[in-house]
Amino acid sequence: MFAIEILDLEKSYQLGFWRKRKKVALRPLRLTIEEGEVFGFLGPNGAGKTTTLKLLMGLVFPTAGSARILGKSMDDPQVRSQVGFLPEQPYFYDHLTARELLNYYGQLSGMPVKDRSSKVDQMLTRVGLIDSAGVQLRKFSKGMLQRVGLAQAILHDPKLVFLDEPMSGLDPMGRREVRELIQQLHHEGKTVFFSTHILSDAEALCDRVGVISQGQLRGVGAVAELTAQAQGRVEIIFSAAKIPEAFTQLGAESRLRGDIASAVVSDAKQEAALEILRRERLRLISLTPVRKSLEEYYVQNLQPAENRKGVGV
């Protein structure tokens, strides 16, 4: 069973007062997410990431299409008890403490009274806020608010967690803590669907990623598959005290670190580069194809379809 099955979901708005014009926020989207998968939804601001999450959460209504969550229609009330959600900019009651806030969300989710107190403390400990449990939220930093938001999203032990830009505005330590929490959820067998524009986080965490731009899905797949395409170049690493002049004449991109040198050449010049090593009696360490990075795949897929080559969804 798919955790999420999106069937041609789309959303349009009417803009303007007198002369209304149509604004397409999400073009027909067809996408499936496996149970237990960490899926990263990548795209620039305004690409349609938040719109997709709001549609799946029932916060806005689709113009057309439908979706199934955990085998049920996305508007089925029973689905809500199995889903956790952290919006990009959560707003909490400033004068509540962290413990009071989580207790409130525990009541909303129908958590039994006898289990609620211990569960709240367990979540506060998990996100590193147990020492600040009695502090009002108005005194929390951005990172602390993000962590209490994560705690409320997973308080009721959901099967599926939606996170909208969970690393937004966090310092490096805060981002690391959020990454570790997502990894823990993955190890527990939960499905995590999160949007982000921080590619390093997606590359480190995700089983698969999807790239969306201007409301349209541009590409989807495992990170290793999307970056597996070679660029027609090879990187040669060898031992040397200096870069042979012949590599410069060959047009290689060369670099020297200590007594280890590297040179990137086209496939067509690979044999010529190896001949230079033989002639100079330099020891070859490795020869590997240069693969496309996730950043290069991401940037390529943000281009209009007519400008892209060899990219499939």
Image: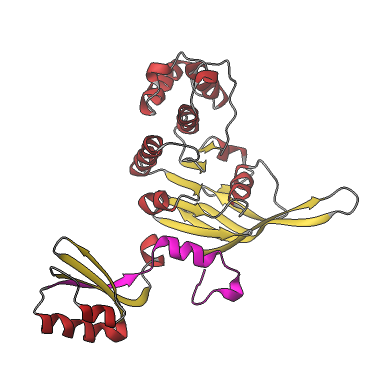
Please give left or right for residue 237 compared with residue 43 in the image.
Answer: left
Front residue of 108 and 245: 245
Report x, y in % for residue 169. Answer: 49, 38
In magenta, the rendered stretch is: 284-313
Residue 95 to residue 215: above or below = above
| Residue 240 sits in quarter | bottom left
Report x, y in % for residue 117. Answer: 43, 16
Residue 77 to residue 36: above or below = above
Furthest-right residue in this view: 18
| Residue 287 sits in quarter | bottom left
Rendered residue at 45%/19% (across/down)? 116
Q: Is any atom of residue 103 visible in this view?
A: no
Front residue of 284 and 58: 284
Report x, y in % for residue 32. Answer: 51, 58
Furthest-top residue in this view: 134
Report x, y in % for residue 166. Answer: 48, 40
Residue 296 to residue 236: above or below = above
Front residue of 4 and 288: 288
**Is residue 56 found inside the magenta-colored segment of the image?**
no
